[in-house]
Image (cartoon, rainbow, N blue to C red):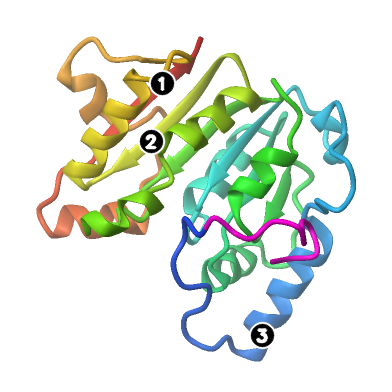
C-alpha cells in the first residue's frame, strides 16, 4: 500500500517492481523526474485535468504501463497541446523514461509510478480523451488470467473516466490476449471496436514510433495487433 491510498491494497495487475539495481546517475534522474512530474493522489483530483499541466492543454490522454517510455514521449512531443499522464510501476522502466528526459520537465507530461487502478479511481468522470495499453503483460498461464489488465472491472473504470468518443487503444503480439481483449470489449456496452477489415488491426497507429517490445516480437516471428475501441 502507498501513501496515496493507504486504505486499499494494490490489485496487482503488474509483476515485479524492480529489475537491475540502478546506477547513481540513473537514480538521481529518476528522483528528479518523480519529484517534479509525479501526480499526488493524496489531494483531490481537479475537476479540470488541464490544471495539472503548466502547458496550455486542450485534452488529456493516459498511457498505462509505458515500459521504457518510447511511445509515451514520442506522442507528448507530437501533441504539445495534449496533456499526457504516464503510468509505470516498474522502477527500471520509469528510470529509462527519466534518462530520456535528460533533465527536461515537459509541460504536458505527468507521471504515476504505482497501481493504475488507483489513478483511474482518482480521476474525475469523463476527463480522459484516450487510453493506451500497449504490449501489456499477457499473463499467459490460465491461473494468472485474473491479473490481465483488461477485465470487466477495469473496462468499467475506463468507461467512467473516458469522454464519449474517446479512444481506447490496445496493442499486443500475443494472440490469446488480443482475442481476450476483443471478447471483453465487445461484451461491454460502452465500447465499440473500430475495424472494417483485417488491415485495420494489422496496421500500426498513425505516427507509430515502434517500441522495443514490438521489435522483439517481430524478431521472434509474432505479428502484432493494433485494436481501437471507441467510448460510446
In percent of width and height, residue 194 lies at 34, 14
Q: Within the image, what quadrant is residue 119 found in? A: top right
Q: Which residues are magenta?
A: 1-11
Q: Which mark is residue 208?
A: none
| Residue named by callout 1 | 229
The answer to whether 194 appears left or right of 232 in the picture is left
Q: Position of residue 7 (x, y in %)?
A: 76, 58
The verdict on residue 16 being magenta is no
| Residue 224 seen in the figure | yes
| Residue 6: in magenta span | yes
Among the 4 quarters of the image, the one containing residue 22: bottom right
Query: Which of marks 1 and 2 precedes in the sequence?
Result: 2
* Relative to 89, residue 61 above or below: above
In front of the other: label 1 or label 3? 1
Quadrant that contains the N terminus: bottom right
- The reply, left or right, for residue 91 in relation to residue 189 is right
Residue at (40, 44) in percent of width and height: 134
Residue under label 3, please give it.
25
- Asked whether the beta carbons under mark 2 and mark 1 sit within 8 Å of each other, the answer is yes
63 relative to 136, above or below:
above
Residue 159 at x, y percent in the picture: 56, 23
Residue drawn at the location 31% of the way across and 58% of the way down: 144
One can see residue 207 in this view: no
Residue at the spot of label 2: 170
Q: Secondary structure at mark 2?
A: strand
Amino acid at each position: 500500500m502507498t501513501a496515496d491510498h493507504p486504505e486499499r491494497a494494490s490489485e496487482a495487475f503488474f509483476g515485479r517492481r524492480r529489475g537491475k539495481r540502478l546506477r547513481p546517475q540513473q537514480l538521481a534522474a529518476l528522483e528528479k523526474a518523480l519529484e517534479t512530474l509525479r501526480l499526488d493522489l493524496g489531494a483531490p483530483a481537479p475537476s479540470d485535468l488541464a490544471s495539472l499541466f503548466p502547458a496550455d492543454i486542450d485534452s488529456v490522454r493516459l498511457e498505462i504501463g509505458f515500459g521504457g517510455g518510447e511511445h509515451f514521449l514520442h506522442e507528448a512531443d507530437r501533441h504539445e497541446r495534449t496533456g499526457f499522464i504516464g503510468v509505470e510501476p516498474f522502477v527500471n522502466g520509469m528510470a529509462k523514461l527519466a534518462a530520456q528526459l535528460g533533465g527536461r520537465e515537459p509541460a504536458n507530461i505527468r507521471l504515476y509510478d504505482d497501481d493504475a487502478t488507483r489513478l483511474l479511481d482518482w480521476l474525475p468522470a469523463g476527463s480522459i480523451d484516450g487510453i493506451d495499453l500497449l504490449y501489456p503483460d499477457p499473463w499467459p498461464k490460465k491461473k494468472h488470467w485474473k491479473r490481465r489488465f483488461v477485465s470487466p472491472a477495469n473496462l468499467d473504470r475506463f468507461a467512467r473516466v473516458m469522454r464519449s468518443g474517446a479512444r481506447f487503444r490496445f496493442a499486443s503480439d500475443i494472440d490469446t490476449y488480443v482475442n481476450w481483449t476483443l471478447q471483453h470489449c465487445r461484451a461491454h456496452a460502452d465500447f465499440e471496436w473500430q475495424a472494417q477489415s483485417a488491415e485495420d488491426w494489422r496496421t500500426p497507429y498513425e505516427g507509430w514510433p515502434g517500441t522495443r517490445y514490438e521489435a522483439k516480437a517481430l524478431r521472434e516471428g509474432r505479428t502484432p495487433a493494433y485494436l481501437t475501441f471507441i467510448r460510446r
